[in-house]
Amino acid sequence: MSPPKTSEPAFKTSKKRIFISLLGLTFALIMLLILVGGWIATIGLNHLHPGLTLIAQIIAGLAFIFLSGIISALILSILLEKDLPFTQKIRGLGIKLFLPLMEHLGPRLGVSKENVRNSFIEINNRLLVSGHRHTIPPERMLLLLPHCLQRADCQRRITTSIDNCQQCGRCNIDALIKLASAHKVRIAVATGGTLARKIVRDHRPKIIIAVACERDLTSGIHDTFPLPVYGILNQRPEGPCWNTIVDVSEIEKALQIFLKKV
Ligand code: SF4
C-alpha cells in the first residue's frame, strides 16, 4: 500500500516538462495549420477580391495573438505555480481544446497516452491548488472513489450506499470512510461515468476529490468542467480495475488543502 518509490519532486517535474513540451508542440502545430490554411485561402481570396486577403491575414494574426496569450499564461502559471488572472478560464481551454489534441499528438512523438494524461492530471491539480482562495465547507466536498478499490471478493453493495461497508479493513474503503467521517466530507463509490455523473448531480459539490486511473480521471475532469476535480491516481498491483489501492495520505493532504482557509 506504499506509494510508488519514484522521488516525488523529480517525478512531478518530469510530468510538468512533458506537459509543457507537448503544449508547445501542439501550439506550433495549430499555428502551422493556421499559416498553411491562411496561405491557401489567400490565393483563392485574392482572385475574388484583394481586400479579402487582408481580412484573412487579420483573422490569422488575431488567432495567433489569442492563442499565444493563452499558451503563455498557461505555461507561466504552471512554472510559477501562481494563480494569474484568468488561470481557471485558461484551465478550461487546456481541458477542452489542448488535451484532446495532446492525446493524439503525444503517442506520435513517443509519449504514451497514459503519460500525457498523467501529466495533465498533475498540472490540473497544481492549477486548482494555486487558484484555491476560499475555504470549501466539508459538506460541499465530495470524495469520489472507483468501485475497483473494493476487494473483488467482498459481497457488500457499497455502490448503493457506502454505509454497507462493514469496515473489515481488507481494502482502502475502510480507511477512506474513516477519513471522510473525520473531516465530515461526503464520500461515494461509482462504477462508471454514468453513476459518477448521477452522484455529482445529487451531491452538488463545489469540488470533487476523485480517485481513479488516468483514463477515468481525465474524462471525469473533462466532463465535469467547470466543476473542479482534483485527481488522485489509484495503483494497480493486480492489473487494471481489480483490487486497486490508493495512498490514503495523499487524499488526506488534498482534503486539508481545500478545507483550509487561504
Ligand atoms: S473494507 Fe471490507 S467490507 Fe468494506 S468494502 Fe472493503 S472488503 Fe468490503
Image: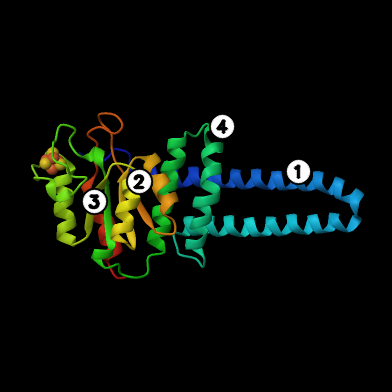
Which secondary structure lies at badge 1? helix
User: Marks 3/4: CA distance?
Assistant: 37 Å
Q: Residue 194: which numbered mark, if any? A: 2
Q: Which residue is mark 3?
A: 188
251 sits left or right of 157 in the view: right
Which secondary structure lies at badge 2? helix
Q: Earlier in the sequence, mark 1 or mark 4?
A: 1
Which secondary structure lies at badge 4? helix
**In the rendered structure, which amino acid carries the disc numbered 4?**
Arg
Quadrant of picture, ligand 1: top left
Query: Dot 4: few (<14), some (14–19), or many (≥20) neighbours within 10 Å?
Result: few
Query: Dot 1: few (<14), some (14–19), or many (≥20) neighbours within 10 Å?
Result: few
Closer to the eye: label 3 or 2: 2
**In the rendered structure, which amino acid carries the disc numbered 2?**
Thr
Q: Earlier in the sequence, mark 3 or mark 2?
A: 3
Q: Which residue is mark 4?
A: 108
Which secondary structure lies at badge 3? strand
